[in-house]
Structures are given as C-alpha cells and as structure tokens.
Amino acid sequence: MKMRRSERIVAITKILIDKPYRLFSLSHFTEKFSVAKSTVSEDLAIIKRVLAAEEMGKIETLSGAAGGVRFIPNKASQDIKETVNLLCEELSDAKRILPGGFLYMTDLIFSPELIMEVGKIFATKFADLEVDYIITIETKGIPIALATARAMNLPVVSVRKDTRVTEGSVVSINYVTGSSKKIETMSLSRRALPINSKVVIIDDFMKAGGTAKGMLDLMQEFQAEVLDIGVLMETAEPSEKLVSDYTSLITLEKVDEVKEEVIVKPSSWV
Amino acid sequence: MKMRRSERIVAITKILIDKPYRLFSLSHFTEKFSVAKSTVSEDLAIIKRVLAAEEMGKIETLSGAAGGVRFIPNKASQDIKETVNLLCEELSDAKRILPGGFLYMTDLIFSPELIMEVGKIFATKFADLEVDYIITIETKGIPIALATARAMNLPVVSVRKDTRVTEGSVVSINYVTGSSKKIETMSLSRRALPINSKVVIIDDFMKAGGTAKGMLDLMQEFQAEVLDIGVLMETAEPSEKLVSDYTSLITLEKVDEVKEEVIVKPSSWV
C-alpha cells in the first residue's frame, strides 16, 4: 500500500527505535515504501526534530556510501536525574536492609522497564567510546549489562564465578574480594571474547572494588582494553577503591541496621 | 511548541513502543500536546493501522475510566518463523559443538538485539495468560527471561543455583538433574516472590526436564500457579520429559561429535 507521510513516519520511527545504533541505509526505506530519497529525507528530518525537541534520543545521519541513519537512545541530563532519583527513593526504604548492612536491590535490577532506563544512562555516558563488548559478571550484573548493550547495540560477555564452565578452553583467575578478603575464582571461556577487544565493564555493586580489579586482571589475559567501568551503586566507604576509573549512578552513604536508616544519594556527576 | 500531526505521531509512537503493555490514558497525550481528545484518537488510529498493516505489533484501546491505550509487541507468525530459522542456521554451525555433545549458544543468548526478538516470541505465545512474574534460573535463562518480561512489562524473579543467598529468609530445594542424575540445589528468597502469584518459567535449555521439574516444585513452595514453561531449545531425546506442558522454539535433533554434524529444527508449532 502507498502510505501517506504521517503513516510512513509511524513505521520509520518504529524501525529505528526498535534497533538502537543499527545503521539503516536510505534505500532501505525508499524501497520499503516506494518513495523518492528526498521524501524519506524529509520524513527523517521530522523524526529527528521531534525526538530532539522532546529529548527522546537522537537521529544520526552518516553520509557516504556506507552511510545511513540510526537512532541513538541518549537520555537528557534531566531525565537521567529523574531516573536516578527514583532509584534512590526506592532504595531508601528501610525494609531493604539485609543482615550485614547490605541493601536488597535484586527486585529493581530485575525490573525490565526500570533497568532499560539504567542501560540508557550508561549508553549515554559511554556514547563516545568505541566499545566492542560489554563485560559483566554473573548474576546481578547481567540485567544491567544487557540493558546497556541493548541501548548500544553491542554483545554482552558474562564472566562466571565458578570454574564449572562447559564451554571449551577457559581462563580462570583468582581474586581477593576487597571487603571480606576472601579468595574467589572467576572464569571466562576463550571463545567468548576475541583478543584485543575494547570493552566496558558493567556490574551492580562496588564496595572496595575487588571484583572489578579481578575483572581488569581477567581482561588483561584477553589483551582487552578496558575503556570504562560502570556500576549501579558504590559505597561511600572505603573511599579508596582498588580501581581508579569507574562511573557509578548511586552512592550508598550509610546503612544503619539498628536505627533502620538508609542513606543513598545520586553519585556526584549525575 | 504546538505540533503538527506528523510530528505528534513520532512522539506518541516513541512513547507507546518504549513501554510495551504500559497503559497510557488519553489525557496523558491531550495534556502533553495540548490537543483535543478527538485529535489524539485520530493520531492513535493512524498508528494502530500502520503497525497492524506492517505486522509491527498491536495498539490496544481499553475503554472506561481505567482505560487507555497500550502497545503490545506481538510478532506475526511469519516473523516468528524467520527469527527461529535464523537461530537454527546459526546453531547448525559445527564449530558450536562442545565436549559431551553440547552446543555453544551463550553468544546468541547474550546478543541483545536477537534475544529481544526471542522475548517477543514468548510474549506473543503467552499474550493471553494473566501472568504476574517471569521466573528463571541463573545464568543463561536470565537474558531470555528479561527479554520476555520486557515485552510483557513484567518483573523477573531469578532462582539461584546455590544457597549462598544473602537476601533474608530463603527457600531451598534439592532436585535431580534429569539427564546426569546429579543432586543439585536451587534457592529463592522469600521476599522475591509473593505467594499465590501466577508465573511463567523461562529457561534456555531442556534435556530431560529435571531443572524445570525442580522449578515447578520450588514454585509449589510459594503456592505459585505455573501457567506455562518456555525454553529456547529442547533436545529431541529423551522424548519423554519430566514436565508435560512447555513450549520450546528449537529442537536439537542430533549432535555428532565425530562427524561434526549438528541438526537443529524449529519446534513443531513454529
């Protein structure tokens, strides 16, 4: 069927938004809708203008033979603030206090709608890096890594916490958890990550940074370049972490089991 | 700014598609765009017609005081066939054969763009069920469960394979893996799942069905009603599984380590 502009725009918006960072050639649309290139260009200009005005993300046009158009789901800084504030509010609930002064946040990490927004925040933060893979460690890092990877159109590689890996030849390293000083093992299948990849590490939580340090060491075994580390929540103490470059969204200032008090704040850059 | 129809339609399409199954009242749009209800209704009619014609999902309008409009990301049966065929093609590669006759599919499960489509397939299959939670078991079930939950706007609850759960009071059960007859443990925090919930179980792989049977038993401890089980891949043998009602997308007919041959097929319903 021959579509009118308002109709074509629905379909083009859907196609672009469904696959963030995926580059579509203009001819993809001219063929699909049997219209001239100039018509598609005008459609795209409208979509671009509206998404920019409404701060719903960016339409990027790359020129040249390998060019095309793609959707980049950048979040506006006000929108980032709102998502992080919402998370802080949820996490301030004293009912979330777990024995040992930990904070229950599994339910938030496993809420797809919310965690997709967290993924978009990391994608916005890392938009200028040339990343090949998002690396995480099981279990609670996985949803955040997937959401980030989804927003950046990248694959995820998940490091395992045991050595029962049935995936061919495996690299295992021992690492010391920063806070409790326990020796743990993490493993990654050789085939999971090509050498010399550029990666970003994503995890849910950082206290002393022992796990992150372990992952940096593991990445060295794969000659990977770690461009950044993103964690959903870090603890204010210890302020000296075992890794220096990382980005957290939320800082856990204090959990008082006796007074039943939790203090969480957006991290300073938010 | 006052928008034209073609502009408004970009923004409305984005808002609806971004949050599948989330119900938006008509006044949400009349206020946001300062237009009459009849204008928004016409916008929505165009979006609905195009998405239906292009088989890109469904716009559903619920009338009444608690009514509104929502996007349901149903996949057309031809589209389901294409996604499953693509997966089968990828999985037929003899390089994927692992020792013991297993098949390496971690990379596919951790490809967000692909696994989002798998999630939409399960969401389409389970669209008529009144589901409260998607249940999965770490690690490889998680991406598929999140994709399904994202398409259905539901939370995920992830069962753990160990008992080192730091999340308050925990229910643990032992189960026997169907194929290797090993006794394993799975655990779930009491606070993770309210009793009497209606759930769908999602996992990556089913051989004899021991893990699925274990999850059914665990769900009984939470008095949950299991409405269906979805697995990405099942093995043709044993044909008698330990659970009777489940939906798989792909059937693994044969892995021959010597001849380096893999035979995978779309499951019969696809």
Image (spheres, coloured by chain):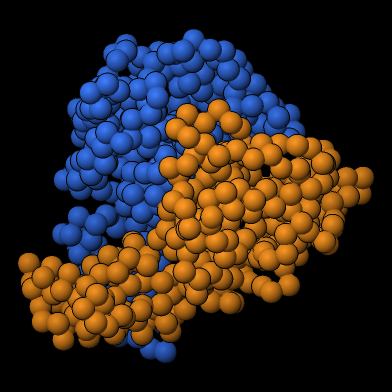
Chain colours: A blue, B orange
Instruction: Using the image, determine if residue B122 lies above or below residue A157.
Output: below
Quarter occupied by the C terminus of chain A: top left
Residue displayed at 49% across by 15% down:
A177
Instruction: Using the image, determine if residue B238 lies above or below residue A165.
Output: below
Q: Residue furthest bottom?
A: A1
The quadrant where residue A58 appears: bottom left
Can residue B118 be seen in this snapshot? no
Instruction: Using the image, determine if residue B256 lies above or below residue A89.
Output: below
Residue displayed at 55% across by 28% down:
B164
Residue displayed at 56% across by 71% down:
B125
Residue displayed at 31% across by 80% down:
B62
- Residue B211 vs residue B71, the one in the foreground: B211
- Residue B152 vs residue B132, the one in the foreground: B132
The quadrant where residue A246 appears: top left
The quadrant where residue A109 appears: top left
Q: Position of residue B33 (x, y in %)?
A: 12, 71
Can residue B209 be seen in this snapshot? yes
- Residue B195 vs residue A204, the one in the foreground: B195
Instruction: Using the image, determine if residue A167 lies above or below residue B140.
Output: above
Q: Position of residue B156 (x, y in %)?
A: 47, 51
Quarter occupied by the N terminus of chain A: bottom left
Q: What is the total number of numbered labels drawn onto the structure image?
A: 0
Q: Position of residue B147 (x, y in %)?
A: 49, 55
Q: Position of residue B251 (x, y in %)?
A: 75, 61
